[in-house]
Image (tube, coloured by chain):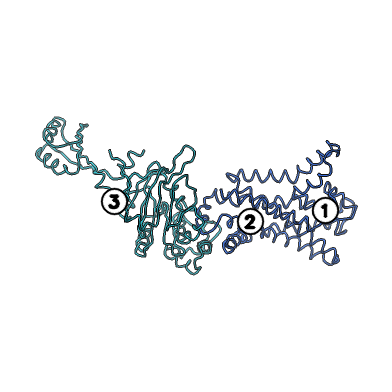
Amino acid sequence: MASIIPAPADPRIAAEAVVSARAVTKHYGAVHAVDGIDLDIARGELFGLIGHNGAGKSTLFKMMLGLTPLTSGAILIDHASVSGSGFRAVRRKIGYLPENIVLYDNLTGLETLQFFSRLKGAPLQDCAPALDRVGLTHAAKRRVREYSKGMRQRLGFAQALLGRPQILFLDEPTTGLDPEAIRDFYAILRGLRTEGVTMVLTSHILAEIQERVDRLAIMAEGRIRAIGTVQALREQMDLPLWFDVRIAPEHFDAVRTALGHLPISAIEAHDGHVSVQCRRETKMAVLEALATLDGRVLDLHVREPSLEDVFFGFSD
Amino acid sequence: MEFAQIGTIAGKEFWDRIRNRWVLAVALVFTVFALAIAYFGGAQQGTVGFRSIEFTIASLVSLVIYLIPLIALILGFDAIVGERERGSLDLLLSMPITRFELLLGKYLGLAAALAFSTVAGFGLVAVVLSTKLGLAELLHYFGFMISSVLLGMAFLSLAVMVSVFAADRTRASGMAIALWFFFVLVFDLLLLGALVVTGGSYGGEIFPYLLLANPADVFRILNIFALDDVRTLYGLSTVFPRALAEPWLLSLVMLAWIAAPLGIATWRFRQ
């Protein structure tokens, strides 16, 4: 199975890193929530952090924001240590959307943004445009108490955009959003990317973000299991694929014979079909060999394992 | 320290209490109680109507000493733990604000709401009674109002400290109620019991000073009058040495009672 791919020490990224983590751990008693993480995120990068609930994503986020002290290691955001006294200045450049955001029910949408705008030292006249950007202008004067989950999430996102942050931390940002809102959300991120904003977002759904981020890291049990572009991860993983060949039981041996000369990693007989596992480079040769069985093959199905299967498979 | 940040937090807390009519409700409670005491406080002695400011204040003191600590503790006990439990604390702390600024802002906003309702509630009574009072009596009453505000601030400070230490809101409310029981009901009894048990022979001279270890007693002493027939209303506080019963000195003690719990809360919140 897949082995752990060490985070490649990319000197190009490390040199212009806006977020830089070194040997970061967070232990709660015997629980190692974050267990030795090295990570560099370059300026202007859209970076995804993938993992199951409990993989350590949110803990890592909170340490990056200086909300949770590190057990050991160091994190620099824009060259300032998260535990240093100079971090207040850095906070002004950061936008944060927490997981399952909780806002104040008794404030209206606009008042919510005005409150956070004051804290960030951002101009109050930017609040109305921020509401407009997330499509909440119609609800500006309604209390958050009356907002749906999706509206709260959008208001939380508008809050994160206040003060034109240079770094955005978005923890499960699309939770509760409908597909249209998710599309709008990523459109905003693309716009911010052209402005050079660095963005780090987490998700437990790889499929949603894998085509939208520049790079991603896959976390499990407090560690980064793999890091890189989606393309690079696929190539590094060299994922095996499965053929499910539907064929009558009396022809099972014919399949074995036809594939006998090929480097097959597994062949399993099931009720009414044979499953064949092989590497990607053998895929076409297997197809040609199966074609020689002409009329006997009733159906053929190729199973491409996703990155998710591989990484989450062994992290469980 | 950035005062703008403190002001933003304080402003939100204050306006929240104005908008949900907390300030109005508490002010009305104070007004109604103060008027009832002023006019019917002597009913047990068979008289009805305003008697004297000394009697009115003495009766108000025994009411306020129960009521204000309770109101202050209820007002403040979830200041921090409430944000933590709801899940809004992380977002607040991700802002360019220090923990001290957040805590102080919360305290000042709640203190303003409490002070505003105290002054408005009792002030209204002063306006109603003003035709019956001379300048010296009005000053007495004014002193009572200021000391009530200080009493509220001290217990609010304790409440905010509880809200930092408590793991959840349920425990915070339990701790707040325990503090109220201790300072308002149990403290004087313990002191008195110790006095009686030792026959006043051992350490009797330090007992008056132990009264300073309870903001509720400091409040009582602040409002003691020379008038002998009301002195009995103040219980144990009458043993306090006259020489030390200087309003400015007692006010300093009260300020220490405001500052110390806030200081401890800040230390803990930074951990």
Q: Secondary structure at mark 3?
A: helix
Instruction: For marks 2 and 1, give the one nearer the viewer.
Output: 1
Q: Which residue is at 89% across, 55% downward?
A: B227
The residue wearing badge 1 is: B244
Subunit under mark 3:
A
Is there CB contact under 8 Å for labels 2 and 3? Answer: no
Residue A215 in the image, given as x and y percentages of width and height: 32, 53
Tell me, what hue is chain A? cyan
In the picture of the structure, the residue carrying the numbered disc 3 is: A230
* Marks 2/1: CA–CA distance: 30 Å
Residue indicated by mark 2: B107
Where is residue B8? Give x, y as percent: 57, 62
Residue B112 image point, x, y percent: 66, 60
Residue B235, percent from left and from top: 84, 47
Residue A286, image quadrant: top left
Q: Is residue A109 above or below residue B263?
A: below
Q: Amino acid at mark 3?
A: Val
Real-space Cα separation, disc 1 to disc 3, in angstroms? 77 Å
Count neighbours of disc 2 (C-alpha within 10 A) and say few if under 14, some if 14 to 19, many if 20 or more.
many
Q: Is residue B66 left or right of residue A248?
A: right
Identify the element where label 2 is drawn.
Answer: helix
Q: Residue at x 85, y 59 (%)?
A: B53
Secondary structure of the residue carrying tag 1 is helix
Tell me which chain the residue with mark 2 is part of. Answer: B
The letter of the blue chain is: B
Within-10-Å neighbours for mark 3: few <14, some 14–19, many 20+: some
B27 sits left or right of A21 in the view: right
Report, in whole angstroms, how far the alpha carbon at label 2 lies from the one at label 3: 50 Å
Left or right, A111 with respect to B136, comes to left
